[in-house]
Amino acid sequence: MSAPTSIVRYTPHARQIAVHEASEPHVWAMMGYGTGKTTLGVMEALSLACVTHPGFEGIVAAPTFPLLFQSFVTEWTRWVPSAWYRQSTHPMYGPHIDVHVDQGVSRIWLRSTVDARSVEGINAAWLVYDEASRETREDPVRVLRARVRRGYPGRQRRHLYIGPPMTRTHWTAAQFGAGPDDAHQGDAMGWTDGRRRVVRGRTRDNPFLPPGFEHDLRTQPGTSKAWVKQFLDAQMGAIEGAIYEAFDRDVHVVPAASLKGRAWRAVIAGVDWGWAKLGVMLVIGVDGRGDLYVLHEEAHAKKNVDDTPNGWLRIMHRVCLAWRVQRVYCDPSRPGDIEAAGAKLSGVSLVYPADNEVAEGIRRLSARIEWTAERARVKGTTGAALVGRGGFFVSDACPVTIGEFEGYVRKRERDGSFSEQPEKRNDHAMDALRYAEMETDNAA
């Protein structure tokens, strides 16, 4: 950090540095417990007030005033010398911090989103929103954002949001994305659309934590796998009713580069037809251990199953040649399309109608996913890997498949309970994968 923050002897770790160095105007520090989220928020606020926008106003907010004062203000007083600022409460305008700078005063308004109207009239140069993901409503956040409008000429007006991940339906995910996809570049530890960046930080990414801190949290009585995944591993919580609850990006998603050049016992494909909704083709590699890998995906809407340059038959032919696909298993509801695909792929791959036993396919995939997670857990604690059953992995070059795993849910009944039937949404890659899974016993 630039002076004067360097005077406070702040030594950020790598994930904090990634936030400080992010060039986008909107940044979400999506971080778990113990990662120093609030500390980096204090340092950002101090730098914005003293270096980037001296003499202008900024806003530090939280969902409630107790959260704001217990978290941010407490951390501010721990780090920032008292001679640098004056904290007070105006009878009409509320609490604020005046930071002394060469240009006079940089005022930091302290606000909560309980009453978004309290920010009216502020013309801020920047916003730091602590514990942002605890705010369930997006409307007051929009009000906050709208007040960031005037700052030092020619300098970026910064919006920093801090907090652990919630579900993929939360406004934070809607604003910043839920991971790399067609609109967001990056990897599992961070992604951007050019204006909004996510920096993910797990508890274990903080090298300054006391010994045993994370272990104690993971092993305390009553700790669930879902809680650990969300608040220590900084992964978005599963949507209620998720079918593949055990799916874990840190376990099941592998780098595409690690799969290049590998020899496969079999390469097959699953195809789910689509038009208005996505059609999906997945290439699946089965290794000598029986592990299943999603190697490649094609996901397109509004493409006919024909032999035109943009049609599905050309796509299937190209993919089967490139990946040396031996057999293709297609959605059996459209026999005419299966026949056309068989004719196009003659001499390249064999084409079959898929086994569409939904419950059995889900059961088999769930078992693979859960077994893979258990293998990773045992290997992580003992160094020895479990053997005996086939696991499941997906290349990080398959964002549609990864996203559907985390959004594939069961139907909700009128009484609020969940049935065993999946919702007909976020299921195109899931169906294609299920078709392939049903045939893996025959892969040879």
Image: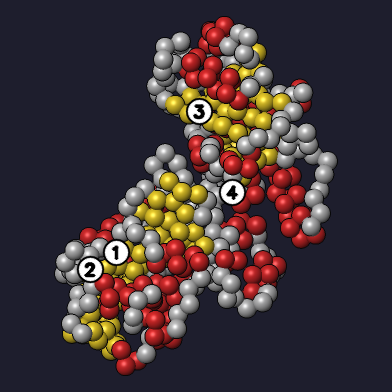
Residue 94 horizontal side relative to residue 359, left or right: left
In the image, residue 243 sits, relative to residue 4, either above or below, namely above
Mark 1 to mark 2: distance in Å? 7 Å
Mark 4 to mark 3: distance in Å? 20 Å
**Mark 4 highlights which residue?**
249
Q: Secondary structure at mark 1?
A: strand
Between 407 and 351, the one lying in front of the other is 351
Q: Earlier in the sequence, mark 3 or mark 2?
A: 2
Q: Earlier in the sequence, mark 3 or mark 1?
A: 1
Mark 4 is on which residue type? Answer: Arg
In the image, residue 40 sits, relative to residue 182, either above or below, namely below
Q: Residue at x 77, y 23 (%)?
A: 444
Residue 19 horizontal side relative to residue 379, left or right: left
Badge number at residue 158: 1
Asked whether disc 4 touches disc 2, contact meaning CB atoms under 8 Å apart, the reply is: no
**Mark 2 highlights which residue?**
125
**Mark 3 highlights which residue?**
298
Q: Residue at x 22, y 65 (%)?
A: 155
Mark 3 is on which residue type? Answer: Glu
Mark 4 to mark 2: distance in Å? 36 Å
Q: Residue at x 35, y 91 (%)?
A: 82
What x and y, as percent, mark residue 141? Answer: 31, 60
Asked whether disc 4 touches disc 3, contact meaning CB atoms under 8 Å apart, the reply is: no
Mark 3 to mark 2: distance in Å? 43 Å
Q: Work out whether residue 52 can be spotted.
A: yes
